[in-house]
């Protein structure tokens, strides 16, 4: 079955009170539990916003160079993601809609390229 990435940019979250965020957590966890019960769960998680490590690995010069910090020119950055393994786009849309409702902000959906099985 195809796998789909459902994700959001942190910028889409907007400004809300701590109380508002605390109310969304149980709703989002309930959707993840529903995805698990349906057998479509692969992975879900939110990313550290301020305290987590952020670094860049660049091998374009022929040697790998690591640098600290985000180097994206945009204020947008990935805030969290869910990966589902579902039979079709309609099912991926359904889960994305449930996640968007639970979180209270938009979600974007992209299908992963099919994995090729290596012959050995």
Image: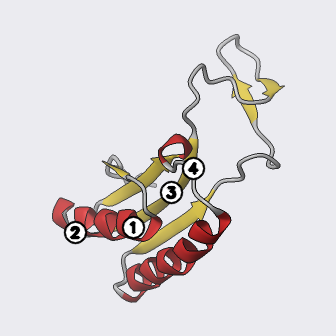
Q: Tag 1 or tag 2, which sits nearer the N-term? A: 2
Q: Which of marks 3 and 4 is in front?
A: 4
Q: Quadrant of residue 86?
A: bottom left
Q: Distance between the residues labelled 2 and 1?
A: 12 Å
Mark 4 = which residue?
15
Judge from the rendering whether residue 39 lies leftward or rightward of residue 19; answer left or right: left
Task: Give the SS element for disc 1.
Answer: helix
Judge from the rendering whether residue 59 lies leftward or rightward of residue 83; answer left or right: right
Neighbour tally class for label 2: few under 14, some 14-19, many 20 plus, Cα within 10 Å: some
Q: How far apart are marks 1 and 3 (CA)?
A: 10 Å
The reply to whether callout 3 and callout 4 are in contact (CB within 8 Å) is: no
Vertical arrangement, residue 63 with respect to residue 49, above or below: above
Q: Residue 99 carries which label?
A: 1
Q: Which of marks 4 and 1 is in front?
A: 4
Task: Give the SS element for disc 3.
Answer: strand
The reply to whether callout 2 and callout 1 are in contact (CB within 8 Å) is: no
The reply to whether callout 1 and callout 3 are in contact (CB within 8 Å) is: no
Q: How far apart are marks 4 and 1 (CA)?
A: 18 Å
Q: Distance between the residues labelled 4 and 2?
A: 30 Å
Q: Distance between the residues labelled 2 and 3?
A: 17 Å
Vertical arrangement, residue 31 with respect to residue 110, above or below: below
Task: Give the SS element for disc 2.
Answer: helix
Vertical arrangement, residue 5 with respect to residue 57, above or below: below
Out of 25 and 73, give the one closest to the viewer: 25
Residue lying at 69% horizontally and 22% vertically, measured from the top left: 58
Q: Tag 3 or tag 1, which sits nearer the N-term? A: 3
Residue lying at 76% horizontally and 38% vertically, measured from the top left: 54
Mark 2 = which residue?
91
Q: How far apart are marks 3 and 4 (CA)?
A: 20 Å
Mark 3 = which residue?
81
């Amino acid at each position: 079955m195809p796998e789909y990435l459902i994700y959001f940019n942190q910028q889409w979250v907007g400004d809300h009170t701590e109380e508002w965020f605390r109310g969304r957590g149980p709703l989002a966890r309930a959707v993840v539990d529903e995805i698990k019960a349906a057998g479509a769960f692969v992975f879900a998680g939110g990313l550290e916003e301020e305290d987590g490590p952020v670094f860049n690995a660049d091998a374009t010069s022929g040697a790998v160079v690591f640098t600290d910090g985000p180097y994206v020119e945009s204020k947008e950055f990935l805030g969290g993601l869910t990966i589902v393994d579902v039979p079709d786009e309609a099912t991926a849309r359904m889960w994305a809609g449930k996640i968007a409702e639970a979180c209270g902000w938009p979600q974007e959906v992209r299908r992963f390229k099919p994995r090729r099985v290596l012959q050995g």
